[in-house]
Amino acid sequence: QSGCARALNSVLCAICGFPICLIIGMVLLGWNERRAVCDEKAIAAGLEKVLEVGCTSPSDGDGSLVMFQCDITKEGLTAGALSTSAGDFASALSSYVGTGLKVKASMYQCVEHVHSETKKDNVGGGKTTIKTYTYSTEWKDTWVDSSQFKKLDSQEFRNSCDVMNPAWPFEVPKSGSTYAASVEAGEFKLGPAFVKKIPLDAAITTGSAPAGWTKNGASFETSKYSTNLRNIGQMRVSFTGTNWAQPQVTALGLNTAGTISEWTAPDDWLCSGFKLQDLRMGTVDKDTLFELLKAEAGGLTWVLRIVGFLFMWVAFCLLAGPLEVAADCIPCVGPCLGDMISSIACCVSCVPGTACCLFIIGIVWAAMRPMVGIPLILLCMTTMTALIVWKLCFAPQRAPKQRLQEGEDSAAHLSVVMGSTYVGPVSEDVAANFLQALRAEYVQGQQGAVGDFFETVNPGPLEAYEDRVRDSGDRVQTINDIAKEWGLRQSE
C-alpha cells in the first residue's frame, strides 16, 4: 500500500471513522446504562413480588411471578420426535426421548492458515504486507471450501493435503441443537425459552450404526467419504441429550394457568417492558437465585461498558492517524517517528475517550438516578474547571522567564554564583533573577522586563532598587554596586 493511499485512508478514517465510532460508543454506553438500571429495578421488583409454589397445583400463583423446584418429566415428549434432524441416524435415535438433541459432527479436512507480516517502507510512507500460506489436516465441525485456497499449486499444499475437501454429505447431520416445543416440570409447562436452558450433556449410546458406519463408544465413524490416502473426508458423529438422572430444575417466571413464561416488571421512571425469567438445574433458593441474576446483569454491564469505552478510544485514535502517516513519509527515520507518534497518540487518546465515556454514563445516571448521577457530573465539571483555571494561571507565569532568557545577550549575560556572605533583602535566587531583569530592561532596552518579573514574585523592597537604577546616570555600575552590596559575586 503506497504512502498516498495510506494518507487518504487515514484522512477518511479521521473524517468518517471518528464520528461513527464515537456515535456507536455513545449509543451503546447510554443504552447499556439504562438497561443496567432497569434490570436492577426489575430484579428488585421480582424479589419483592415472587411467590414460591409447589409442583402439584398449577393454579397456585396464577397470574403472578412464581418460583418452584420440580423435576422435569417425559410427559408429552414423543420418542424419536427429535431424530428427524439426524439424517441417516434417525433409526438409531428412534427410541430417544428428551428435551432436546445435540449433534456434534466433524469431518477430517484440509485447512489453510494465513500468516501476515506488515512492514513500513523506509521511504514514501507506504506499507508492505507479506502473507505466508500453510496447510494442515484437521477435524472441523463445518465444511471448509478448499476451492478458495490461495496456493493450491504450491508444494506446501501438495505435501500437506494434495486433494480437495469433499462436500458435506447431505445424509450426515451437521453440528447443532434441536429442542422440544415445551417440557413439563411437575404440573407446570415450560415454554421454549426455558427448554433451551436445560443442558444436553448426556451421551446417547442407544441404537446401532447405519450402513458404512462403525460405532465407537458414544460416537459413529466412517471412511466411506474418503477416497485418498490422507483420510481427508473421514467423518465422525456423536449425539448428546437430556440427563434424566438429574431432572430437578428451579424455574422463575409468570404463571398463566400452569404455563410459565416471561414476567414483565412494573413500569418505572424511564423503564418499561423489562422482563424476568430464569431456569437453573438443581435446587436453588430464592435469595441465591436473585443474587445470581444480579451478578449476571452486572457482569454484562461491565462487558458492554468496556466495549463502549473501546469504541470511544478508537475514535480518538483515528483522529491521529494522518499524523502517523505524515511522519512515515520522512525518509529513513520516518517509520520510527510514525511508530512513536502512533504510540503516543494511543496513550493520549485514552484520556478524552475515558472522559467521554464517564460523561455519557453520568448523564444517563443523572436521568435515571439523579442522587448518584448529578454528583458524578458535578465532580467531572469541577475537575475540568480546575484544570482549565490551572492552565490559564500557570501559563502567564512562565512567559516572563522565557522572554528574559530569550532576550539576553550572550556577551552581557549575568551569571550569579551563590556566595556564603549573601545579605540581600530577598532569597538569592530571586535576587539573581531581579538583577537579570534590571540589566535586560535598563541596559539592553527590553521594555517591561522588570514589570514582567514582578508579576512572578512579590516586589516588596525590590521596587526601591529599581528606582535607584532608573534614576542613575550609570546604570551598569549601579547594578554591579547592588550585587556587591548583597554579597552576590557576578561574572560577565
Image: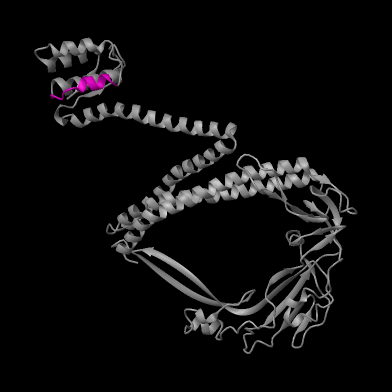
Residue 449 in the magenta stretch? The answer is yes
Q: Is residue 85 left or right of residue 161?
A: right
Corner quadrant of residue 374: top right
Q: Please provide percent x and percent y for residue 391.
A: 36, 31
Query: Residue at the location (75% across, 85% down)?
Result: 213
* Horizontal side of residue 417 vs 214, given as left or right: left
**Is residue 268 shown above or below 343?**
above
Snapshot quadrant of residue 404: top left
- Is 222 situated left or right of 320 in this image? right
The segment highlighted magenta reads: 444-455
| Count of labels in the image | 0
x, y percent for residue 344: 40, 48
Residue in front for this viewpoint, 336 or 258: 258
- Residue farthest toward the bottom in the current orientation of the protein: 227
Q: Decide which of 227, 386 is in the foreground and name it.
A: 386
Quick one: quadrant of the N terminus? bottom left
Q: Is any part of residue 49 visible from this angle?
A: yes
Instruction: Indicate the quadrant containing the C terminus: top left, top right, bottom left or bottom right.
Output: top left
**Residue furthest left in the image:** 473
Which one is nearer the viewer's eye here, 89 or 349? 89
Q: Is residue 143 above or below residue 24?
A: below
Q: Position of residue 138 (x, y in %)?
A: 62, 76
Q: Position of residue 116 (x, y in %)?
A: 45, 68
Can see residue 337?
no
Above or below — where is 439 with respect to 37? above
In the rendered structure, does residue 225 fall within the stretch colored magenta? Answer: no
Q: Nearer the viewer, residue 169 or 351?
A: 169
